[in-house]
Amino acid sequence: MESTNNMIDYNLIVYIGIVLMVLIFILFIANEIDKRKKDIELFKQQQLSKSFEKGKNANTNKSN
């Protein structure tokens, strides 16, 4: 008879590796989505700042 207590279950190691790779991939995708949202928010803030500056300069030119 074989003693299975001392043997390593290689299938378990493979499954754990696959789960880790999938988890890392999902975290990478979530990170990229978050970076994209922050980039869009920054772009909107920059456009809003430009708009305020443009309006501010237009109002100061009218008063002069």
Image: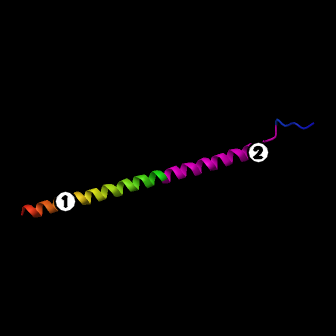
Indicate the amino acid at tag 2: Asn
Q: In the rendered view, does 44 fall on the left or right side of 20?
A: left
Residue 55 badge: 1
Q: Residue at x 82, y 35 (%)?
A: 5
Q: Nearer the viewer, mark 1 or mark 2?
A: 1
Q: Quadrant of the N terminus?
A: top right
Residue 17, horizontal then vertical, whole percent:
68, 48
Q: Provide residue 4's location: percent of width, then percent of height.
A: 84, 37
**Spatial distance from mark 1 to mark 2, Cα to Cα?**
66 Å
Q: Residues within 10 Å of mark 2 (few under 14, many from 20)?
A: few
Q: Is residue 60 left or right of residue 41?
A: left
- The amino acid marked with disc number 1 is Gly
Magenta residues?
Answer: 6-32
- The answer to whether 8 appears left or right of 22 in the picture is right
SS class of the residue under badge 2? helix
Q: Secondary structure at mark 1?
A: helix
Q: Nearer the viewer, residue 3 or 58?
A: 58
Q: Position of residue 30 (x, y in %)?
A: 51, 49
Residue 16 among those drawn in magenta: yes
* Residue 14 is inside the magenta segment: yes
Q: Which mark is residue 21?
A: none
Q: Nearer the viewer, residue 63 or 1?
A: 63
